[in-house]
Image (tube, grey):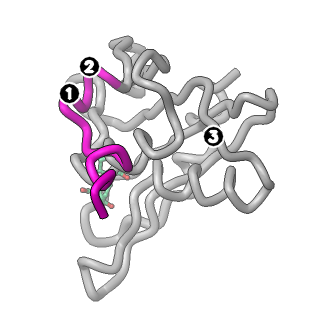
């Protein structure tokens, strides 16, 4: 189900500058699915990633915890979330949460949030503040 959702939302990505369309779909712990695509901007740093869009949709719906997430792009190997998105995912997902990286050709790589971001910065690191 997440694969189909991410495949479809990828087609709606706004990526006129990189021409690299990305789709993301996540299931929150409530069971609901949320989707996102990358949305670029002529001021390049203002663009947002597909994962950020899916997370924003989840939060807007009232859900706050990711149970599973999948990302897809037309890349030669399964597309990995960028560093910033790894931190964004880790905000709402436990280290054992499954992350499936996909290509539009059907290749898949299954990882966990902990695999993608070992040594993650967490609120616990601010315990003295
Ligand atoms: N991008 C994503 O949306 N997610 C990823 O996991 C990798 C990169 C987007 C950002 C930008 O719009 C384009 O792909 C090229 O970097």
Closer to the camera: disc 2 or disc 3?
Answer: 2
Eye-nearest disc, 2 or 1 = 1
Q: CA distance from mark 2 to mark 1?
A: 6 Å
Q: Quadrant of the N terminus?
A: top right
**Front residue (pair 26, 59):** 59
- Above/below status of 91 relative to 45: above
- Residue at coordinates 25% horizontally, 79% vertically from top-left? 44
Q: Contact, CB < 8 Å: mark 2 with mark 3?
A: no
Q: Which residue is mark 3?
A: 8
Decide if residue 72 is on the left or right side of residue 54: left
**Could you classify mark 3 by the number of other residues whose Cα lies within 10 Å: few (under 14), some (14-19), or many (20 or more)?**
some
The residue lying at 38 percent from left, 65 percent from top is 15
What is the quadrant of the C terminus in the image? bottom left
Name the element at disc 1: loop
Residue 61 appears at what percent x and percent y? 79, 55
Q: Is residue 124 magenta?
A: yes
Which residue sits furthest bottom?
43
Q: Position of residue 93 (x, y in %)?
A: 50, 33
Image point 35% across, 70% down: which residue?
16
Separation of marks 2 and 3 at Cα, in angstroms = 27 Å
Mark drawn on residue 118: 1
Report the residue marked by disc 2: 115
Query: Residue 93 vs residue 73: left or right?
Result: right
Instruction: Report the magenta residues as a range.
Output: 114-129
| SS for dot 3 | helix
Do the numbered discs 2 and 1 sit on residues whose CB atoms are within 8 Å? yes
Q: Give me the C-alpha separation between circle 1 and circle 3.
A: 31 Å
């Amino acid at each position: 189900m997440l694969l189909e959702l991410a495949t479809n939302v990828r087609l709606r990505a706004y990526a006129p500058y990189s021409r690299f369309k990305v789709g993301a779909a996540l299931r929150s712990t409530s069971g609901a699915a949320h989707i996102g695509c990358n949305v670029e901007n002529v001021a390049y740093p203002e663009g947002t990633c597909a994962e950020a869009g899916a997370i924003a949709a989840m939060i807007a719906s009232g859900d706050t915890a990711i149970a599973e997430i999948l990302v897809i792009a037309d890349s030669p190997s399964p597309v990995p979330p960028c560093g910033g998105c790894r931190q964004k995912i880790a905000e709402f997902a436990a280290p054992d949460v499954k992350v499936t990286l996909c290509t539009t050709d059907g290749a898949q790589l299954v990882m966990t949030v902990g695999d993608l971001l070992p040594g993650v910065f967490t609120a616990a690191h601010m315990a003295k503040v």
